[in-house]
Image (cartoon, rainbow, N blue to C red):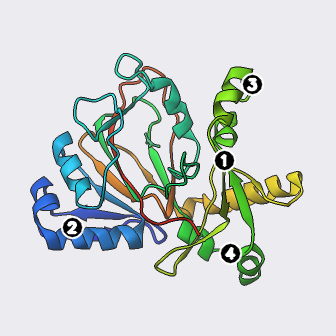
Amino acid sequence: MTFAITQTTKAIGAEVTGIGPDGLIDDDSIVATISDALESRGVLIFRGLDLEPETQVAFCQRFGGLDYSEGHHPVPGIYRVTRDATKSSAAEYMKGTFHWHIDGCTPLHGEPPQKATVLSARAVADSGGDTEFASTYAAYEALTEDEKEQFASLRVLHSLEASQRLVYPDPTPEQVKGWRARPTSVHPLVWTHRSGRKSLLLSAHADHIVGMDANESRALLDELMDRATKHDLVYRHQWSVGDTVIWDNTGVMHRASPYPAGSPREMLRTTIFGNEPIQ
Ligand code: SIN
């Protein structure tokens, strides 16, 4: 089978075929092609790749520095995504992945958002557990010319609290205190990337538009989220064991569809640090 990259939907996604784990690491021209396709398609799908965790780490190292923080997994660089508390002490926090998000929009020390993320399926859920990806470039492109002009100067405050309130609508004072300990960040609504492309920076962590009436701001952010996550701008991956997906975190929002606590679903995640500030 020859190496091929085939578009999945018009707005986002491509399937990569005809490549095995070795080619992902050893072949410079394939890595370069994958890197270009990631930038243009946002999400790349490798069905049945059956990557070993060490190979997944080696593949990701081709794209930049990796996050090696505690991942509840023996292989450094791998983070185990699971709602099974016997496998990870962070299982409870995975409920946060059920809401649209872009990793790294509320950094601790102003670091740029992560460049890309890889997930590989070790076990799948009996119900739920798909992952959805929405192109924030396509969301910007779908705006009218008037809206593009109107939104060019808007700035949005992003907070951990905004996203966590969707998960825990009735929080304890201690929870609120914990969320507020994380710095908030103000970003432009329209991210002008180094490439010149523009994307809409939205998600569950977008709390309010700075300087706008609270109700008006919430209504506008909700409307933009509805439009940005319409069926035709989204790729939904239904996992089989052995699948691997990589996405460009700077131009894609993602979320998992809910699956139960204790589910056998287990994904191995690798995160590549970013080097492009939001501006
Ligand atoms: C994540 O948000 O990093 C995980 C998404 C998933 O489990 O599908």
Q: Which residue was labeled with disc 2? A: 31
Residues under numbered marks 3 and 2 in contact, where contact means CB atoms less than 8 Å apart? no
Q: Nearer the viewer, residue 247 or 272?
A: 272
Give whichever of discs 3 and 1 has the lower sequence position. Answer: 3
Q: Which residue was labeled with disc 1? A: 184
Give whichever of discs 2 and 4 has the lower sequence position. Answer: 2
Mark 4 vs mark 1: in front: 1
Give whichever of discs 4 and 3 has the lower sequence position. Answer: 4
Q: Which residue was labeled with disc 3? A: 170
In percent of the image, x 74 and y 22: which residue is there?
Answer: 173
Task: Please say if 29 is above or below 73.
Answer: below
Where residue 262 sits in the image (x, y, percent)? 43, 20
Disc 3 residue type (three-letter): Asp
Q: CA distance from mark 2 to mark 1?
A: 35 Å
Mark 2 vs mark 1: in front: 1
Q: Is residue 104 visible?
A: yes
Where residue 52 sits in the image (x, y, percent)? 17, 41
Where residue 144 sits in the image (x, y, percent)? 71, 79
Give whichever of discs 4 and 1 has the lower sequence position. Answer: 4
Local secondary structure at mark 2: helix
Q: Quadrant of residue 189?
A: bottom right
